Structures are given as structure tokens and as C-alpha cells.
Amino acid sequence: MIEPGMKPNGPARMVTWLLLALCAAIALFPVLYMAILSMQPAAQAMNADGGLVPGSLADTAANYSAVVNDDAINFPLYFRNTLLIAMLAVAGVVCSSAIAAYGFARVRWRGRQPLFIVMLATMMVPFPVVMVPLFVLFRELDWIGTFLPLWVPAWFGSAFSIFLLRQFYMTIPRELDDAARIDGCGHVGIFLRIILPLSLPALLVVGLLHFMYVWNDFLGPLVFLTHRDQYTLALGLELYMSRLGTTPWNLVMAASTIMVAPVLLLFLFAQRSFLEGISTTGLKG
Amino acid sequence: MKRFRTLTGLAWISPWLLGFACFTMLPLAMGMWYSFTDWTLLEPAIPIGMDNYQRLLGDEVVHIATWNTLLYLVISIPLLTVASIAMAVLLSKPARFQAFWRVAVFAPSVLPLVALATIFKLMYDAELGAMNKGLSYVGIDGPNWFGTEAWAMTAIILMNLWVVGPAMVIYLAALRDVPRDLNEAASLDGVSWWGRLVNVTLPMISPVILFNVIIGFINAAQVFVVPYIMTGGGPNRGTYFWSMYVYDAAFKYGDMGYASTLGVVQFAAILLLTLGLLLVGRRYVYYRGGMT
């Protein structure tokens, strides 16, 4: 029997190791598959016995330049569009959520608790449920076919980000507020001088999560964008693949890689704060 | 003074309050109203009472979409729950390179669903795909994944196993909070590893299981992107889900009134089932230190 607190014995450790390696391999396979196929010449990628080895550097360059220079589907433009929308949305979400979260965490007032619960409940409203009326609303505003529906709502905060920031604010000692109050600070002063500087890591996580959300969003752009020049990468990739009759898989995989690479790099770069941010959402509020 | 405080609080949360009114409450109210109208965007909406709801009851596509969505929920949620808990348990074991394993298992979850579905569409390809190739190595003749309704549904559900990340991370945090001495005491009493998992660990993390099941349910009930990309809802509408019908009704057939009705019914169904899950779940959940 294994004594508690002791290290597991040899065989058990080996099994854990094997399982971990197997799971990691399975998890990473699709990404590796995509990357390898994006480096193969069409003849190899479209052949069932082509194997899982990348082609030459020249093949790779040819694939990516074919994707970037496609006549009908302008990936560089879609990349810029997506980036622009994402940055506008992230700036909005971070600013407004930081402010709203202060109201939920630091100001004591009647109605705070019920409204907080209402806010949590709004996270449960699925987008498909509101997309039709939202389309009608934005059509009235003449926003359909512009980027506005994709980033303006972000400037009113998102329930998820406010919740995350509020949880973080709660961990900042109240004594700091009191000290600032003695120095003559009001709520604005406390917010700007104490809460904001101390929550930079949390703000970063919120920004990162929202960036990925916007970058990956498909249904929003599908509903609100009308013109091909405004497409985001998600729509571009779908369009590119749906003309599969003429687009070989190696090029589709190269296009996917272009879309996947930024989020994957961001995640690797900030994985620690990223995973911590997600795990706080599971804690009770 | 008290009123002043309330005003201060409201002022701070006003960004969210405004957004909530404009982009959640207003659309919900509009959707309600349009669900009782006949409206094609070209002409003003005509109130038609309950006609849309009546039509919905007899609409065969609604039956298919409801059945598919329910089937998907009933299979994928237990599967995802078991998979994400198993992964979390495995990843919580002390092992070398722990950070690497976690990042590797989580990585597919950050990929855009459009891209992930695109990759899997190729992987499931009966002739070129890696899935059947891999199966052939172990002597299994892989199916034509997108050829029949059942296999197409299976393909979509299986793909979800690559997106266990968020739930898994939440389970990992919950596992870390399970008091060590409980497991150690059980271990001293000669309780096996499995017995400790079922009788100690799972009850201790049961509130988090309920939380994840509800989040997973709400997400799965609006499934759209993966079937849209991978199967287009086919074959024979075998993977045609409720959200796809809402989308098609509105933007393909231009029937905004009926699409609103579909949305309202979807919302009501999600709301009721979520409440049901909460009520049923509460009876089985163990809360440390009483209810929260």
C-alpha cells in the first residue's frame, strides 16, 4: 500500500506518465496535422498515402504565398479587419468592465446584490436567441455591414469580464481604501490610484480572453457583416474552404494556420495567467 | 445619504446597465414582440397572434432540430463531464513537466472553432483523413463519417472531446481545494484509489461539477459553428440543430417573425432546463460548510 504523503511507486508513476503522453499527443495531433499539411505540396496532401511529413521549404512558401495572394479572398485584409475589431472591442471591454466591477465590489449600496445576480444570469442568454432582434436593432441604426455591431457593445462591458474583475477586486485589502480615504481620496481616487494599478494582471487576463473571443467569433460577423471587404478571418476561412472544389486541402490548412497562429502564440505566451483566469470563474461568487 | 450611495453605485455600474438595457433586455423584448408577427423585413410587421407558435408545433424541421439538439445534449454532456474530470484527475497527479502537459491538453481549446472544425473536416475525410488512416493501423475499417446521420453526429460529438480545456482547468482548481487529510484518512483505512475518487473526491467537487454541467449545457444547447462548418447540417438534416434553424429562418428565408419565435422558444427551453438542472443538481451536491 502507498503511504499517504509518499511519492507514488514506480509502476504507478509510469502509467501516469504514459497516459499523460498519450493524452498530450492526441490533444496536439490536430494542430500538428494542420501545420504539417500546410507545408505539403498539393499532390502529397491530396494523396491518401502522402504521409505525415512536411514538404520542402519551397513547397511551404508556395502554399502560404498562394493563400496570402488569393484573387478572391483577401486574407491580409481579413487579418487586419479582425485585428482592428478585436483591439477596439478589447479596449472597450477592459475600460468599461473595470469601472462597472468597482461598483459591484467596492461601493456599498442597496440593490447591488440583486443586480449582480441579474448580471450573472445574463451570461446565460445565448447569442442565437438575441441575434435576430439584434440584427433588426442594428439595421435600424444603419450599422449592418459595418464593424460597429462587433465592437460597440463591448464598450458597455461584458458580464463575464465584470464578474472576473469583481472577484479580483474583492481580494484587494479594504485597508488600502481606508488609507486613501484618509488622504482625501473619493471613489474615483481609490479606483485610479489603488484598484487599477493593483489589478493590472487581472485586466490583462480579461483583455486576453476577450481578444480570443472576438478573434474566434464566427456567428457575430456572419450575421452583421455583409460585404466581403469587411470579412474577418473566421468568415474568410469558411469561404475559402467552402470553395473546396478548387481549393486543395494543403492551402486550406495554411489558411487555418494563419488564423490559429496568433491565438496559439498568445496562449503560450500568457498560459499561466490565462489558466488561472479561467479557473477563478469556477469559484463561487 | 443612503440614496446618494445608491446613485453612486448605479453610476459606477452604468456602463453595464446601459449595455444590459440596449443589447440584452431590448432585444429580448423585441424578439418576444416579433414572435407574434409575420415579418419579412420588406414590409411592416403584421401581428398574427399565436400563429407562429402553432406553426412551430407542426413544423417537421422543428421536430428534427429538437430531436438532434436533445440527442446531442444527452450524449455530449455526460461524455464531456467524464472526460474533463478524468483529465483533471490525471493532470493533478504529481508528474514531471506538469505545466507542459496542462498546456498541451488545453491548447486545442483556444483554437477558433472555425479552424478546429476545418481541421476535423479533413481528419474525418473518408479517403484522405487521418482518422480512418489511424483506425486502419489497428485493423478497423473506418466509417464514411459524413455519409450517415449517426456517424455525422458521432463525428461532431467526438470532436468536442478536444475542447475539454476550460472545464478541466476549473476541475483542477477544485481538486486542489479538496482537503488532503480526507484522502489520507481514507487511504489509511484501506480505501482503494477508486473508492476514494468516488466517495471522497467527487462529492467534494460536486458543486463545481454542477457548475460545469450547467455552463456546458448552455453552450451545447446553442451549438452552431461546428456543424455549420463540418456537415452543413447534413446528411438529411441529421446534424441540423436548433440554432441553425433560427439562423436559416431569419437570414436564409428572411422570415424574421418565425425566426424570433424559434429564438423565444429556444430561450425558454434553455431557461427551464437550466433551472431544472439546478434544482435536481442541488439535491445531489454536497456543500462544504452548508449552502452557499
Image: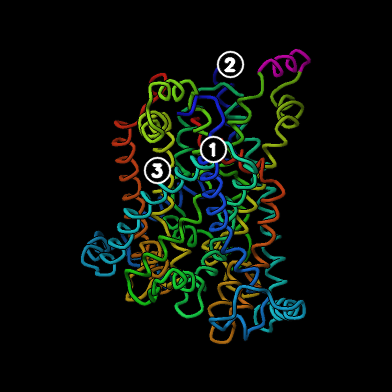
* Visible residue check, residue B206: no
**Residue position marked by numbered label 3 in the rendering:** B214
Q: Do labels 3 and 2 share a chain?
A: yes
- The colour scheme is rainbow
Instruction: Answer with mark 3 or mark 2, whichever residue precedes in sequence.
Output: 2
Q: Where is residue B191 in the image (x, y as percent from the top left)?
A: 37, 27
Q: In this view, does B67 lie above or below B171?
A: below
**Residue position marked by numbered label 2 in the rendering:** B1
User: Is B194 on the left-hand or right-hand side of B113?
Assistant: left
User: On the image, which quarter does residue A204 sit in?
Assistant: top right
Instruction: Answer with mark 3 or mark 1, whichever residue precedes in sequence.
Output: 1
Judging from the image, what secondary structure is the residue with disc 1 in? helix
Q: Looking at the image, do the residues carrying marks 2 and 1 touch, with CB atoms under 8 Å apart? A: no
Q: Looking at the image, do the residues carrying marks 3 and 2 touch, with CB atoms under 8 Å apart? A: no
- The residue closer to the viewer here, B167 or B54, is B167
User: Which amino acid type corresponds to the residue marked 2 in the rendered image?
Assistant: Met
Q: Residues within 10 Å of mark 2 (few under 14, many from 20)?
A: few
User: Which amino acid type corresponds to the residue marked 1 in the rendered image?
Assistant: Ser
**Residue position marked by numbered label 1 in the rendering:** B92
**Which span of residues is magenta-colored?**
A174-184
- The residue closer to the viewer here, B119 or A158, is B119
Using the image, name the chain to which the residue with label 2 belongs: B
User: Is B212 on the left-hand or right-hand side of A187?
Assistant: left
Instruction: Tell me the quarter of the image containing the N terminus of chain B.
Output: top right
